[in-house]
Image (cartoon, helix red, strand yellow):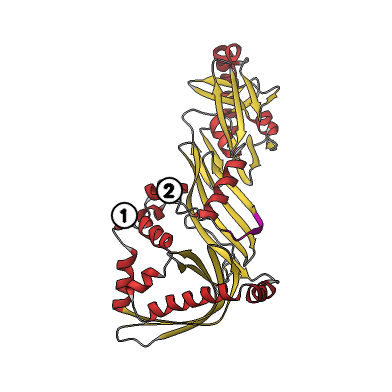
Amino acid sequence: MIRKFLVSLFCFLMTTQLFVGVASADKSIQLYVNNEKITGVHPIVKSGVMYVPYRPFFSALGFKVSYDPVTGEISGVIRGSEIKFWAGDDVIEYGHATYYLDEAIPVLHGQVYLPLRLASDFAKYSVHYDKPNSSVRLKPYGYGEESAIQDLLTKYYETFSPRLLSSDNLKLGYMDREADSGAYQPVSGIKVLDFKMTIDWIEFTSATEARLRVTYIKNTEVLNRSDVYLYDIRYERGQWKIANDASIFNRMEMPEDIDKKAASIMDNHYREQNAVLSDLRTYYKALNEEDLELTVQYTDPSFIEDWNSRLRLFGSKWENSMKDHFAYSDYRYILFDERVVYLGDKEAVVHGMLDFSTAKEDEEADNYVYEVLIFLKYANGHWTFSDDINLDLDFDKRFDSAGNPAKLSGW
């Protein structure tokens, strides 16, 4: 009862004070949401803070709030979180947080006013105040940014370029941003038959930050692939960047017609496909015999250049890395059931099984047999190893053992 009396008294005093101080000067301020003028909602400015009448404001954004005349409590659900406050108080409860205001919540002409920027943050709208034109424009977080975000997510999946990372991304600690000249944008003659990037869901935590889950479908002449990623992205220096990411799902399958393609290459390009397989065997022979010079000769020069460029900050050379591997580990590669499934002028793909074993000093060999796709480039007069994909590395981490959706650290 005492609180209700105090709220009523406060409302009367604040109505008088605000009416004298700001009503006539601020009624001309117009509110726009998504470039549409909102009638009946006129922001006011008091002590350097802009306020809006809470009920018509939230109603214009599509949210409903209620008032309890007995307790004076105003409440509602904004973006899935409960909001609660009282006129005359200097606190607002929203979600699991309490917000303390510099001044008490005012009342004018029987309407309770809230600080515009705080109320807009709750509703996830950015605010732009055009003082010369006496207008305030609100836009949902991410409004108009859909194309830029999709472009970022597509480019990153294709290139993993360090130039697409935010300044605080931990991956930059071992990558050289300045070396991104094109080595991260490989050009391939292998046709992409279908590519689709879908944002499964996106949550903007501020006007410049968002969390996403993204599904990629990429089908080529030699591989059908599905990937799901979690991302934190941030708007930085006029561009959206990747702040954090994690792969939570991967599935890889050979196309249904891959046997026909391999048979066609065997029938129509027998000599050429034999040259590919012969050079690939030479590459694995060099590895097994720990012949560094021959290994370099049968490794794609652009692969070596890319490696050296990425790790230039650490002064690590690919040749030195191979020397260390040969010196401290015993790798053995046995390729079998191999066949050429793609053959271009400068690019080839081999499908087969790889028996891989490794052992360090004073350790027994660890043997692993897996299905593999091996990519080769024609360079220096012969075919050279460029990259490989382990087709047995499918995984699904979209949910943990308790059935909870996957999250990035900090979520």
| Residue at the spot of label 1 | 313
Label 1 element class: helix
Residue 317 in which image quadrant? bottom left
In the displayed structure, 127 sits above or below 352; it is: above
Q: Quick check: is 100 in the magenta stretch?
A: no
Q: CA distance from mark 1 to mark 2?
A: 15 Å
Q: Specify few, some or many for label 2: CA neighbours under 10 Å numbering under 14, 14-19, or 20 or more.
A: few
Q: Specify few, some or many for label 1: CA neighbours under 10 Å numbering under 14, 14-19, or 20 or more.
A: some
- Residue type marked 1: Leu
Q: Position of residue 189 (x, y in %)?
A: 58, 59
Numbered mark located on residue 181 in the image: 2
Residue found at x 55% / y 67%: 348
Q: Quick check: is 190 in the magenta stretch?
A: yes
Q: Position of residue 103 (x, y in %)?
A: 48, 28
Q: Position of residue 31 (x, y in %)?
A: 64, 23
Which of the image's four quarters has the N terminus? Answer: top right
Question: In the image, which residues are magenta?
Answer: 189-196
Residue found at x 66% / y 33%: 58
